[in-house]
Image (spheres, rainbow, N blue to C red):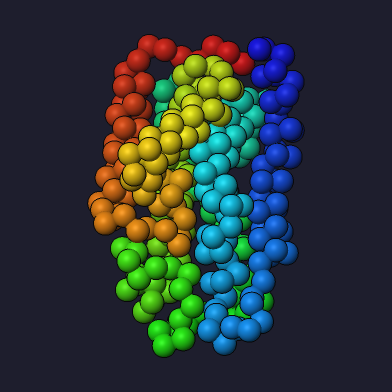
Amino acid sequence: MDYFEHKLLSSWRIRILLIALFLVPVLHQQFSAKLSGDVVWSQTSLNLMMGFDYSSYSSLYYLMVPAVAGLIGNQIVFGSRSNLSPILERVRLGGRRYIMGSALVGALIGGLLVTGPVLVDWLIAFWRYPVIHIDPFVYQPILSSSAALFPLFLNHPVVYLLLYLLLLFLFSGLVTAFSVIMAWRTGSQLRGIGTAFIISLVWWVLTTVVGHSGWSPAIWLIPNQGYDPSFVLTVSFELAAGYAGISWWLRRLMHDDYLPTKS
């Protein structure tokens, strides 16, 4: 296990993997997404964007967000021990304050890195087909009228896109902060990377089994979903509960005698 963590999960391998996870979704989406020639007049750049094309690859990206965030959190904790970045140097105040600063920095970095590929993909899609206005009379449904935020999508599509970027940023930042704390607290790269992903995967399976898959971030993060009637309440509750839980955990650690010993 130590060999696996120290060799296969070495810092440079994690960085290469993160770069690949940034580039592959954008390249795959923009090379595979095409407008249908016979209905171009009723389409917009939204039809080319990740999260709107109903492809299994787009769904997979959002399902894997916790795993990617876990990799980022792992890199912040274990990668920084041998090669400290300036931003982490500033928050390395020793012991308890260090984990607080690392979690906050992790939330910011994780949010930016996970939303980055989606933002780049959307900008390329708009560059390829610079039409964003949705004409309700010739609208080709890429979002059902039963979706909770359909009026916002129809009347203010840019605001709708920004809202989903914000949701992705907040969720990925939350998971990265959790992964930072888990990796720091346990001294295990595997737990730091995998715990949040396993929890998210189990939650997705359970919500699907009971017929409420829209309760899972793997679904409500996707822009062309949001059919669950309690969408707004569900998203607000899960994000608020997650950040409240992280805050509580950090407060407990600030008063804990435990300090990381594994280097």
- Relative horizontal placement of residue 20, taking residue 89 as reference (left or right): right
Image quarter hosting the C terminus: top right
Determine if residue 228 is in view: yes
Coordinates of residue 157 in the picture (x, y in percent): 43, 74
Coordinates of residue 224 in the picture (x, y in percent): 45, 62
Residue in view at x 35 percent, y 71 percent: 145
Q: Nearer the viewer, residue 163 or 112?
A: 163
Coordinates of residue 116 in the picture (x, y in percent): 58, 55
Residue in view at x 50 percent, y 33 percent: 197
**Up-down: is 172 above or below 4?**
below
Coordinates of residue 27 in the picture (x, y in percent): 71, 59
Residue in view at x 42 percent, y 58 percent: 225
Determine if residue 101 is in view: no
**Up-down: is 54 above or below 79?**
below
**Up-down: is 95 above or below 245?**
above
**Up-down: is 253 above or below 235?**
above
Image quarter hosting the N terminus: top right
Image quadrant assignment for residue 99 = top left
